[in-house]
Image (tube, rainbow, N blue to C red):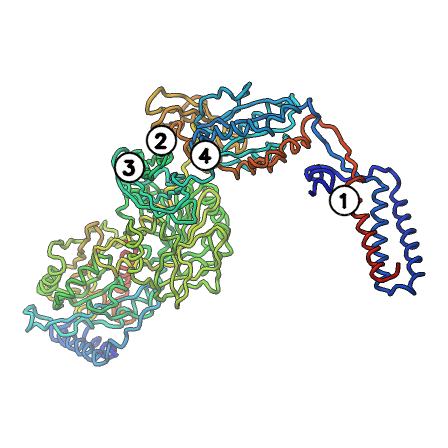
Amino acid sequence: MGNQLVFLTPIFVRNRMNKSVNILSAFSVTVLVYLGIISAASGDPFTDRNASDAEFTFVRLVYNSAPAMYQGYGYGMRDSWRVDWPDAENHFLQGLGRLTNVNKSAQGKLLSLVDDELFDFPWLYVLEVGSWVLSETEVQRLRDYLLKGGFLMIDDFHGSREWAGFIATMRKVFPNRPVHEIDNNHEVLHVFYDLDNRIQIPGMYTYWSGNTFEKDGVKPHWRGIYDDEGRLMVAINFNMDIGDAWEHADHPDYPEPMTALAYRFGVNYVIYAMTH
Amino acid sequence: MLDYLLKYPQIVYDQGELIFAREWPVWIAIASFVVILITISVMLLAKRTTLRLPQLFCIWGLQLCMVLVVLVVLWQPAIMTEKLRAGDNVIAIMLDTSQSMTYSQADGSRMQEALTVIDNDAISALQDHYQISRFTFAHDANPTESYETLPSPEQMTLLGNSVRQVLSMSRSTPLGAIVLVSDGADNAGALTQDQLAELASFNVPVHAIGVGQEEIEEDLELQEVTLPGQALPGTILAARVAVRHDKPGQARLKIYDNDNIIMSHDLELDEGNKISTAWIDIPVSDTGYRHLRFSLDPWEGEQITENNHQSRVVNVKEEKYKVLYIEGEPRWEYKFIRRAMDKDQSIDLVSLLRVSQNKFYRQGISSPDELVEGFPLTKAELFKYNALIIGSIEAASFTPEQQQMVHDFVSERGGSLLMIAGLNGLGSGGWENSLIYEALPARLSQSNGKFIREKAKVELTAAGLHSPMLKFDQDINNNRKAWQELPEIADYQLIGELKPAASTLLTIDVNGENHPLLVNQPYGRGSSYIFATGGTWRWQMSMPLEDQSHETFWRQLLRELVIDTPGRFFMTSQVTGDQISIKTEIRDENYEPERELKLTAIVTPQTGEAMTVELHPSQDIPDLMTGEFRADTSGLYDIETITRRDNEPIASARIAIYHDAGKAEYFSLRANHMLLQQLADATGGRYWNQDELDELLSAIEFSAAGITQREISPLWDAPLIFILLFLFKATEWLLRRRWNTI
């Protein structure tokens, strides 16, 4: 399973995390994480495409990503959509079921933008979008999907280079729609929980490295793209890793307040998506 | 022949009572019969050597019949009748002098035909036996000396009213019967059962003689146009038109908004149908009173074209209606309903969404206090809304008092209730055991009504095809096609048997079998709907981006829910001929009738002086305030009713109507002999064809009204008696001859 390597690493990492974590160890962790992801990918995630018998299905967007050498933005990798899959959504769905009245599926679902079923699921989650590559058809379908009422949560991409990679593709989807900072009064921050104190939610290995940010993404940004009626349709969690906090919710070394906050953001996004 | 054999005409037997004039005790007759029976039996048994048993039995029967007839004759049978005493009684003749009697037929006008009937010998013969009172009538009955000079034709006929007036005027006179000559074309529509019962209570038979033709092949009549009195801008009005015709064909209906033609529609008038109906969609956009005129192009040779037109006024107004939507779980249907309604300026959709067990999320509220305690706890709070949507939430989430309030919201407040399917909705939510269940249009089942997440196709029913809320296109075929092209929905609930007043507007195809999906019914002052799916959002997500089907469906459905919900001050009007009645109801915030209020209507005609009409409590319905006025000129009538308490105005309401003065008589133009028959039957009289009038005098003779005398008519000498006696004896003789016993 995709998280096997991740669960093997804690002792290894914990022994080195006491005070000073150097760049090398952080690099090692990163390599191991990627190795773990690649290991997880050795199975066929598309076999888990069973249709949901629930109102809400957590759909993770499958996209093509280009390595840095192809894109020129660095940090790109093939199949980066798989990061944190499937534990992130499986953990989050349990929390969503416990905390809200949402009738949710037991597991998440994988869909690409060209999938016939895409429009049956108005919720999409996508991460590592610094290296995403969308075809013209995918761009068109994503635009239609969002304007019809679908909701896209973007997570886990960091620094100016990845932003540039993300926004280059997003500009194809919405050439003229600006990206706004979500201010504290926005309904998405109050629809279920009042999220007035927003702090950066780091990935587990970043946290272990003693930081809360990655690359040059020091400051977290909650950004959004709105439709013509002012409704949020794309929630952009930039310079943070909410998915990692979900994924490691059961990890003894990941700080519980971060996980709790990540759940709260997730819950608010889902409730907002289902009400606006 | 029968009259000869029985000695008297049949009417004597119909009206009279059979008696025995000989006042001998009945036991003597029985005893005599028994004695004779024994005697005959003994005598015949003595002859058994000459006759076989069947022959004996035959002779025995014949002799017994003859003895029986003789005994009946000895007891002197007779018919006892009550008859009008000649010379002492009054017979009223009523002649219809309304406009419709001037209608020309091949052999003259109806009036000429009526005067010929009155000059008939049979009618003239009445004068030899009774005093005659003559009346003309149309709207009212008026006494007249003779029919040589007739009043000008009147523009309206009220048959029941006129007969009642004659009966009332004749209370002090011995009125034996009324002879009424009319075409039966009554503009009040028909005689109600109450009117007939009232007329019957006078015990004076009305003998009706019909004139005129019941079919006029060359005439078209736009009999009725039904459409809502008010509408929201941007909606489509569904108008139902009914055309009276006596031959098949085609008719062109033109619709004008004031003087501008807005549409033309060809109607197929089917063979075999006297009345053909059609639904026509009329889009309305601009606000204000819209004077819509419906006009049928005349057929060739049509004499009367005044009955080809009808006018209606529709008040198109920007009004804010409030709809409360309570939902038990976050779900996509909720989101997409809200999105569909976001741009609707006429409806405020206020929603209460249970996002967790203890948390409700409010949207669309107009103040921070609105619904702050959750679902309304008082009638005043709930009744502010025009419609209520209940989604996927259990009945147990509502207190019994709240359930009763929802029931009353429909039945008393006149609101609309829409229940939509869901995991905890309808049968799965235990609503069949709730106090609201009675108001719902279908039975619910907990076992069969589970929420099923499977794809299924929605289909339009014949009733749904004409429903304004289900119109995607004004053209009926395009509309049907639009529905066929909608993507499948992916969830539904099966509902149980429909209640008697319910209609199915949409169905769902489950494994080739159609099940009701959208059903509704009127309930009390309001109406209730069930929409057994929560999956229409898939129309929005699956159809092309520019498609508006989902938005249109929900906007039209919610507009339909609210448009006819009465406000606290509710006013309607009714036109009968040139008489216009106003009816109002005033209710407090709990929709309890408000009393001790003074109501005044200010009526402003398009031409002429404004008038004031005081409204008073209706005799039949005390909560209803009514008043009426006469509209003598054609045009728009603006009616504003002002409510006062202690002379202080507290509320007002306004409507407008268009009245075609003096046109009532052109409608219901065809002779209605059935109505005359109804009147005659209800009062104990008879409907007469003109070739049967010879019997009229004798029929009137037997009236029980007026001054009567009892008459006993003997029957013992009726020819039939003697024929029977002869037949019995002759048959016996012939049989004995045949058997060679004599």
Disc 3, SS: strand
Marking on residue B587 = 4
For badge 4, the amino acid type reads: Arg
Secondary structure of residue under mark 1: helix
User: Which residue is tagged 2?
Assistant: B658
Q: Are marks 4 and 3 in contact (CB under 8 Å)?
A: no
- Label 2: few (<14), some or many (≥20) within 10 Å? many
Label 1 sits on what residue type? Leu
Q: Which residue is pictured at 41% across the width and 32% down the height?
A: B666
Viewer-nearest of discs 1 and 2:
1
**Chain that bears disc 1:** B
Say above or below: A45 vs B311.
below
* Residue plotted at (23% across, 51% down): A186
- Badge 3 density bin: few <14, some 14–19, many ≥20, Cα 10 Å: some
Which residue is rendered at x = 88% and y = 63% of the image? B51
Q: Residue B346 at what x, y percent from top left?
A: 30, 42
Q: CA distance from mark 4 to mark 1?
A: 74 Å
| Cα–Cα span, label 4 and label 3 | 37 Å
Q: Is residue B109 visible?
A: yes
Indicate the quadrant containing the C terminus of chain B: top left, top right, bottom left or bottom right: bottom right
Amino acid identity at mark 2: Tyr
**Image-based side of B645 in relation to B201, left or right:** left
Circle nearer the N terminus (1, 3): 3
